Image: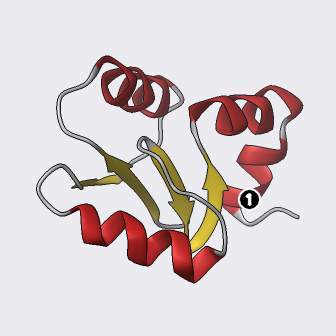
């Protein structure tokens, strides 16, 4: 089934990054990982683009900011994440 593009911005091999990857994998989603550890300007640029502070791990779907792992978990538990990713809104 079609899935929208997920990009996970992480700060490398942190525990929070690992948890975000594990959560997305367990939900059965494919995703791209972008490591921001070596480029703090990338986070500054993302924060300016979406007009809020971006701290890794941070998840985007089709260039739309969803938030950190807690926000994505809440979307998942409510069923909204599946609707966003599979296009069944």
Q: Which quarter shows the N terminus?
A: bottom right
For the point 55% across and 82% down, the residue is 49
Quadrant housing residue 85: bottom right
Quadrant housing residue 12: top left
Q: Most extreme residue toward the bottom, as rendered?
A: 49
Asked if residue 8 lies left or right of residue 78, the reply is: left
Q: Which one is in front, 24 or 57? A: 57
For the point 66% across and 39% down, the residue is 72
Secondary structure found at label 1: helix
Asked if one can make out residue 62 in the rendered structure from this viewpoint, the answer is no
User: Residue 28, how many percent across, how many down?
Assistant: 48, 34
Is residue 58 placed above or below 26 in the rendered structure? below
Residue behind mark 1: 84
Q: How many marks?
A: 1
For the point 43% across and 41% down, the residue is 57
Asked if residue 64 lies left or right of residue 39, the reply is: right
User: Residue 16, how many percent across, how many down?
Assistant: 39, 23
Q: Around disc 1, counting alpha carbons within 10 Å, would you say few (fewer than 14), some (14 to 19), or many (20 or more)?
A: some
User: Residue 81, how many percent across, how many down?
Assistant: 73, 46
Is residue 57 placed above or below 84 in the rendered structure? above
For the point 80% across and 26% down, the residue is 77
Q: Which quarter shows the C terminus?
A: bottom right
Is residue 10 placed above or below 1 in the rendered structure? above
Q: Which one is in front, 62 or 82? A: 62
Asked if residue 34 lies left or right of residue 52, the reply is: left
Q: Most extreme residue toward the left, as rendered?
A: 38
Asked if one can make out residue 28 in the rendered structure from this viewpoint, the answer is yes
Quadrant housing residue 25: top left
């Amino acid at each position: 089934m079609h899935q929208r593009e997920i990009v996970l911005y992480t700060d490398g091999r942190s525990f929070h990054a690992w948890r975000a990857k594990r959560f997305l994998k367990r939900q059965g989603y494919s995703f791209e990982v972008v490591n921001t550890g070596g480029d703090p300007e990338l986070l500054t640029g993302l924060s300016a683009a979406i007009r809020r502070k971006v701290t890794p791990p941070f998840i985007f779907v089709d260039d739309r900011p969803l938030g950190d792992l807690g926000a994505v978990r809440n979307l998942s538990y409510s069923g909204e994440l599946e609707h966003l990713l599979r296009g069944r809104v």
